[in-house]
Image (spheres, grey):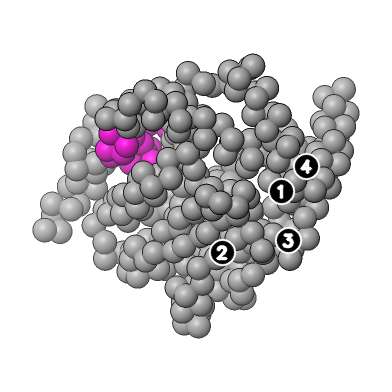
Amino acid sequence: MKTLTTRLLLLLLTAISRLSWKNLYRLSDTFRYLIFNVGKYRKAVIVANLRNSFPSYSDDRIRQIASDYYQNFTDIIFETIKMITSPKSDLLERFDLEMDLLNYYYEQKQNLVIMAGHLGNWEMLNLVASAKLSYQIIVVYHELANDTFDDWFRGFRTRFGTEMVPMKNAISKALEPRDKPFLFVLINDQSPVPDKAYWTHFLHQDTGFFRGGELIARRLNAPVLYMGIFKDRIRRGFYRAYFRLITENPRLEPTNAILQSQIEQLEADIMAQPDNWLWSHRRWKHRRPADRRPPNLFPNQQRQTTRSE
């Protein structure tokens, strides 16, 4: 019965994906009202996250950001559904992809590690990048509990050649030999296991981040770029992605410096467009373990750093 229900749901989602963009956003507006105004989906989590992140903002400002986020949340859901059947040309028109750094490193035949957060429609950018770039796109993702839905989701994510890699296989896949340069993309601003996280101050709060991006960058010794996504304030469903160099030589950087640089750039982007981030996630549900003391180095790393100095 569970499999049948899942398959019926997938048929419904495919049917929705064939709607025009105009009708799709009408449906998004309806769901926004039902989910947030009627169902009050995680409204307490969203408002608490916003108040803790922006303690100097007035209640009116917090409510406005929350309201804008509700629209952003449902828009991304329905834009993602639309990508199941959207032609390549349609998606390419909706994303202004900054290419200068990517083209430069591709000419040098260099692999790149891309570090990002949950800004804008990252799912749409995945398809746009794999359709537009010469690089092999490799994206690290969390597998879904429902195998049928996971297969379906992975199917449209790989429509234009992206390779999806489960997080548990990230390092081994990063080290595999390949025929052409690749972009290894990691979104690391979820809530990690506290004992394995990198802890820092982020949006006025003690926050843990996944460390895999820096670990993989050091293993590959490949240039690391930060990727930011801004949404168009005028045209609904249009975005711009940009890239900034963090380092060309990861192994020469101090421990956690790559992560800290990415986190600071992500925080600046959130401050610029606060409704463009994923506020409904319970990102601050964990507390920093007592042995993760400043400067946020693990004990063995701290001893190594002291010896090297």
Residue at the (36%, 44%) spot, across then down: 271
Q: Is residue 93 above or below residue 299?
A: below
Give how far across and how far down residue 192 sits, in percent: 44, 35
Q: CA distance from mark 3 to mark 2?
A: 12 Å
Q: Give the total of numbered labels.
A: 4
Looking at the picture, which amino acid does disc 1 mark? Arg
Mark 4 or 3, nearer chain start: 4
Question: Is 209 colored magenta in this rendering?
Answer: yes
Residue on which the image places disc 1: 154
Q: CA distance from mark 1 to mark 2?
A: 24 Å
Question: What secondary structure is marked by label 1?
Answer: helix
Q: Quadrant of residue 204?
A: top left
Q: Are marks 3 and 2 in contact (CB under 8 Å)?
A: no
Q: Nearer the viewer, mark 4 or mark 1?
A: 4
Q: Quadrant of residue 56?
A: top left
Residue on which the image places disc 3: 90
Q: Nearer the viewer, mark 1 or mark 2?
A: 2
Residue on which the image places disc 2: 96
Q: CA distance from mark 3 to mark 1?
A: 20 Å
Residue at the (81%, 40%) spot, across then down: 16
Question: What secondary structure is marked by label 3?
Answer: helix
Residue on which the image places disc 4: 23
Looking at the picture, which amino acid does disc 2 mark? Asp
Q: CA distance from mark 2 to mark 4?
A: 23 Å
